[in-house]
Amino acid sequence: MKISYGKQSVNLDDIRSVVKVLKSDFLTTGPKILDFENKLKKFMGSKFCISVSNGTAALHLVGLVEKWNKDDLILTSPISFLASANCAIYNNAKIDFIDIDEDTYTLDIEKLEKKLKIKKNVKAVIAVDYAGHPCDWKKLKSLSVKYNFKLINDNCHAIGTKYFNRFDYAIKYADYVTHSYHPVKNITTGEGGAIFTNNKKSNDKLKILRSHGMLRNKNMIDYSLHEIGYNYRLTDIQCALGISQLTRLKFFVKKRRSIAKRYNNFFKKYNFVKIPMEKKFCTHSYHLYPLIINFGRLSIDKKKLISIFRKNNIFLQVHYFPIHLQPYYKKRFKFKVGDFRVAENFYKKEISLPIYPDLKQKDQSKIIGIFKKIFKKAQL
Ligand SMILES: Cc1ncc(COP(=O)(O)O)c(C=O)c1O
């Protein structure tokens, strides 16, 4: 059987919950939406939650509600999924990147402050809790106050992460928190996402924007349109799955952590690899297990290593190719090799190992076994 870097874990309870909705009156815009939002809100400790069709839609709408425009500069990490940067383009804003920290692979706070001192039009910083390790949110918050910009936590990887021992850390620091519930994430709704905020005005507007921008009149028949929105709604079917998944989130994170512990115990013996760091202030949720390999010390390169695993039906991944070096970003914004060196070096050395709750012990052993062979050859 094929082993990939991430995979959903769906059980009979999930299936029963979805089937129940399929037999009910509402497949969409029904009671499960509010139910899911209320449960998410409770877990995330936010005043408001707006479920949306995916994590990209969540980021798009945050820019829309914040009225980003061509004079605004949005900063994010080059080591993230494309959506963390694309959302600035959707909203006609300018985009720039901040290099990553060598240890946590999240935004380098010192480099961020350097940029904030020069650039006066920074409207928002989208900080990504990469792989499930939180950013230094206390410092980010103090910078957002000092330099007056909005703070967005692209929290897609970190559902179930703890910061200073709290699951509900994200909205304590960020103005908006966004989630994706894609199947590889820590919980899934198939496709799906959410926005969290404590601002009522933003909440009210986001709820209108996720459904075309339509404002229903009191009679619930007529509606009016004052601002263009989108169809970014989540369905009741998806919410039912989300509700069921959320009850197992802590268990999922526990399983991910036990796999990471096993990998750590094996890899820490080798001085040419670097295991993911877990700073004292957090509990990593290991959405990803990014391993850094000094390929100069091996007899094979990254491509070859990935192909050896493929031959064994194990599909490693790389998270991520730096966004600023994507052809679109290079061409349109003139980013070039060398702009963000830590991110670029990280990309050269990083591979993401399979990690998901249902990854079997024997498959973990198989993965470790292949590395053992490769490393043995390399050291000869
Ligand atoms: C960090 C990050 N941001 C945003 C997204 C976009 O989420 P979605 O795929 O649900 O649109 C993802 C999903 O891969 C992600 O990993």
Image: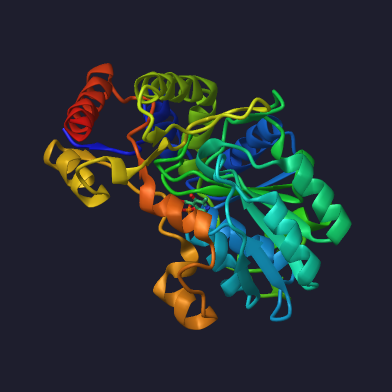
Q: Residue at x 81, y 53 (%)?
A: 143
Which residue lies most toward the left here?
311
Seen from the viewer's position, the closer of residues 227 and 113 is 113
Residue 237 seen in the figure = yes
Q: Position of residue 266 (x, y in %)?
A: 34, 21
Q: How many marks?
A: 0
Q: Position of residue 47 (x, y in %)?
A: 78, 40
Q: With respect to residue 123, does 165 lie above or below?
A: above
Q: Quadrant of residue 42?
A: top right
Q: Quadrant of residue 228?
A: bottom right
Q: With respect to residue 379, does 102 lie above or below?
A: below
Q: Quadrant of the N terminus?
A: top left
Q: Position of residue 77 (x, y in %)?
A: 57, 57
Q: Position of residue 227 (x, y in %)?
A: 70, 75
Horizontal side of residue 190 vs 297, given as left or right:
right
Q: With respect to residue 355, does 362 lie above or below?
A: above
Q: Quadrant of residue 259?
A: top left
Residue 214 seen in the figure = no
Seen from the viewer's position, the closer of residues 300 and 245 is 300
Q: Residue at x 54, y 22 (%)?
A: 250
